[in-house]
Image: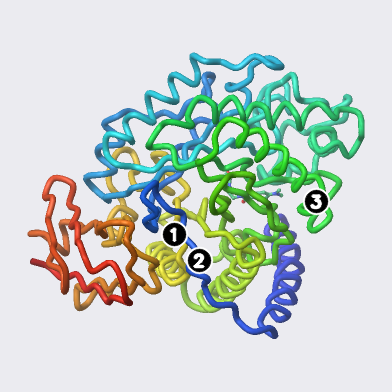
Amino acid sequence: QMKRARWIAGAVVALVVAGGGVAAAAREAPQPARRYVTDDAGRALILHGFNTASSAKSTPDGLPELTEADVEREYQDMGTNFVRFLLQWRAVEPSPGTYDTKYLDKVAERIGWYRKRGYHVMLDMHQDLWGNGITPSKVAGNGAPQWATFMDGLPVATKLPTWEMYYLEPGVIRAFDHFWNTTGEHPELMDRYAKAWKAVADRFKDDPAVIGYDLMNEPWGGSVQAAAFETGPLATLYRRSIAEIRSVDPDSWIFLEPQAVGVNWGLPSALPAFDDPRSGPARIAFAPHLYPLPLDLGDDYTAGSKEWVDRTLGWWRDNILRTAERMKAPIVLGEFGLDMTRPGATDLVERILDVTDETAMGRAYWSRDDGPWGPYDKGKAGPLVEAYARPYPRAVGGVPLRVVYDEKAVKLTITFDANETGATEVYLPGKSFPNGGKASMGEATWDAAKRVLTVKTKTSGRLDLVITPR
Ligand SMILES: CN(C)c1ccc(C(=O)NC[C@H]2N[C@H](CO)[C@@H](O)[C@@H]2O)cc1
């Protein structure tokens, strides 16, 4: 019966998505704008990594279960260069206006493990369902501290068939309504959140590994939804947080997410453009998530439903590009992922990696945790390791136009408009590039320990840099 109910719900939502998709398809398919998150030298970065880690949602200290050896293994196996590192507001600010420097020290220690290996760290103020305090037994929810949780005695079930349904519980809606000031009774909460970001930015503004801040994970508007939410209270929170961050940190990138519901599946976001009060070009990026609806409804990326998934991927791509164009922002796909034991899972990961390559998006897989979704399950490498260990340009000395990896020919082609920002660095996995790689132009240096080929090319003109095995 439950499955039937889910199907009916899914059919309704699929019609909405189809409607959205048809409407979107009726318009000109948008082209990637070739905007990138850049490093201090101005090189375009292709961010390729994981969310680390979901375990942070429930650990008492709000830190992910992670060792430096885990970071080393990830680098050796997959050559990633990026991590979306989960923070918890409850740990940053255990009581109003008091910031836990010991927690931030422990975060800094973990960032150090990534810094040693050349990673870029995006700090994610993570929440799901508001906070751990939405149920007395803490069975669901993470992120917000207890002192910021006001449910006015409204009920929250202690057992629901799926975790997402907690978002509809009266007590959870009320907690969000107070935070967004929809009730008008707690205007201080948004300000506290923005100032918590100021405290984090003040701590990490000079850390060369910290690329920036993902202001809120999968925002949920409570009683206010869709465009009213994204252009209303969500935009207000982002503007206030940007101002607080920029009051101490002029240079880190700021990553803004749309609302999760609908947009994760392919519906358009109404997120507006945001000013960046820094001297120099804006450093504000758009950071959506991608979870194809047919998979959320229990389908696999196989047989008949593969076509549907590909259609929703097309709508998602077009709508994300339209929002990024409105924002004049580069795109980092903050989350995508699935149970890697499902049929077609590896094909879907490879398809999504191709979409991000074609559209200049960074990407962080959900998630690094041990288990059937992750690269390792009970410590054993699964199919995701090979799929994720693909050759890619970590940094490009110019503006990339196309990145195409021809697996059969073992050939990576990077087309870019060269500039004077520096050399291009390419990660080459051991499986297809056992002895490293060679470049079709410029001066190439192979670092066998890091498995990185650094290519000094001309600093002007449109170049087609082709990398093949040495
Ligand atoms: C009803 N709402 C608001 C809702 C429903 C479903 C998701 C979701 O699947 N999210 C995908 C993944 N992202 C989180 C972590 O950010 C994971 O726990 C989810 O699997 C989000 C929100």
Amino acid type, callout 1: Arg
Q: Which residue is mark 3?
A: 229
**Figure check: 82 above or below 245:** below
Looking at the picture, does residue 110 appear above or below residue 231? above
In the image, is residue 301 above or below residue 76?
A: below
Which residue is labeled 2 in the image? 300
Asked if residue 248 is positioned above or below residue 318 in the image, the reply reads above
Displayed quadrant of residue 144: top right
Tell me the residue at 68%/23% (across/down). 145
Give the image location of residue 122, x and y in percent: 47, 41
The label on residue 342 is 1
Mark pair 1, 3: CA separation: 35 Å
Q: Counting residues from the N terminus, which is met first, the one under dot 2 or under dot 3?
A: 3
Residue sitting at x 54%, y 34%: 249
Left or right, 161 with reference to 407: right
**299 sits left or right of 453 in the view:** right
Instruction: Determine crowd level at label 1: few under 14, some 14-19, many 20+ residues with C-alpha closer than 10 A.
Output: some
Q: Is the Cβ of the residue at disc 1 closer than 8 Å to that at disc 2?
A: yes
